[in-house]
Amino acid sequence: MKTNNNFHILIVDDEKFNIELAGIYLQEEDYKVSYALNAKTAIESVYSKEIDLILLDINMPGKDGFEVCSILKSDAKTKDIPIIFLTAQTDIEYISRAFEVGGADYINKPFNGIELKIRVKTQLQNLSYLQEIKNKQSKLAQLSITDNLTKLYNSLYFDAQVKAQLTQEKNFWITYIKINNFEKINQLYGYDKANKIIKIFSKLLSDIAFKNATVARLYGTSFGILTKDYAQQDILALGNSLSKALLKHKDLSKSITYSIVALRVSEPTTLLVIYKKLHSEIYTASNEAGSNILFIK
C-alpha cells in the first residue's frame, strides 16, 4: 500500500483561495499536490501526471465539475480515479447528480481541514484496497493459464487460442513437439532431474519461438507452438534452432531426442480433428530414430 507521500492529488477550483487552502491541509499530511483553475487544465493534468485522487469544484466557467467527471469516468484510463466534489450547494438533487456522474464523495464549502483530510484518506484507502484486489485477480488469472512447472502457457490457454484462430478463417501453423522416450529418461535420472530437463527444454522453446507465437506445455513432454503467417521453411528453421540450442546443453543433447509435427491449418476444421492428426503423426515420428520433423496437412 502506498504511503501518503506517494499519493498525488489534483485540486481543481476556479478560486485560488480554495485551492491554496486545500493544498495547505493536504501537504500537512505529506501528500503530493497539483492544481488546476479550470476544466481544460484539469483534464490535461490528469493525462500528463499520475493522479491518484481529484478534488473537483462543481461550479466553474466553461465545463463544470459534472462535465469533467463524466469525461474522466468514460475513459478506461481514468475511470478509477476517485473524485471528491467541492460544492457550496446543499440541495439533495444537486448532490445526487454528483454521485450519478461518478463522484465518490463530496465536501461542502467552506470546508474544514479535519473533514477534508478524513474524506481524502478514506478514498485513498479504498483506492489502495481496490488495486490490491485487482492485482490478486490478475495473478489468479495468470495462474489459471500458466503451466506450473515450466511457466509456459497451459493446454487450456493454447486450446482457446487455436479456437480463436479457427473462427478468423486465417491460415496458421500448429507445431507439435514431443520429447522422445522420456519414460526411460525418468527411470534413468529420476523424477527431479527429469523435471529439470523439461524446464530447460521449455525455456529453449520459448527462446527460439517466433515473435508473437503462443508457446505452451500441453501435457507431460508434449508442447505446442501456435504461429500465424509463416512458411514451411520458417518451421524448418525453428527445428534447426532447437537442435543448435540443445547442442549448447551437453547433458540434454546426449540424453534426449525430439519429434516435431507441423500442421498448416488453411481450411475450416475443428480442434478435435486437429489434435487427432497431430497425435497420430507424433506417435509415428517419435518411433523414428533421432530427432525429426514432419509436415502434415
Image (spheres, rainbow, N blue to C red):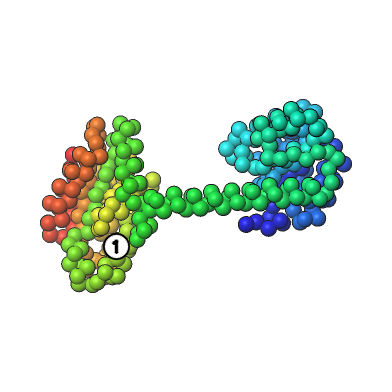
Q: Position of residue 148 (x, y in %)?
A: 36, 58
Q: Is residue 181 in view?
A: yes
- Going 60% across and 35% down the picture, which residue do you hit? 75
**Relative to 283, residue 274 above or below:** above
Q: Which element type, helix, strand or loop, lies under badge 1?
A: helix
Query: Quarter holding the N terminus?
Result: bottom right
- Going 75% across and 50% down the picture, which residue do you hit? 118
Q: Quadrant of residue 204?
A: bottom left
Query: Quarter holding the C terminus?
Result: top left
Q: Position of residue 13 (x, y in %)?
A: 80, 37
- Mark 1 neighbour class, 10 Å CA radius: few under 14, some 14 to 19, many 20 or more: many
Q: Position of residue 153 (x, y in %)?
A: 36, 51
Q: Is residue 240 in view?
A: no
For the residue pair 264 and 138, the one nearer the viewer reads as: 138
- Going 21% across and 44% down the picture, which residue do you hit? 275
**Relative to 254, residue 142 above or below:** above
Q: Position of residue 272 (x, y in %)?
A: 22, 40
For the residue pair 133 and 225, the one nearer the viewer reads as: 133
- Going 20% across and 72% down the picture, which residue do you hit? 188
> Mark 1 highlights which residue?
198
For the residue pair 186 and 177, the one nearer the viewer reads as: 186
**Relative to 182, residue 80 above or below:** above
**Relative to 255, 110 lies left or right:** right
How many numbered marks have been drawn onto this rendered protein structure? 1
Amino acid carrying label 1: it is Ile
The furthest residue to the bottom: 189
**Relative to 120, residue 179 above or below:** below
Q: Quadrant of residue 100?
A: top right
For the residue pair 59 and 119, the one nearer the viewer reads as: 119
The furthest residue to the right: 17
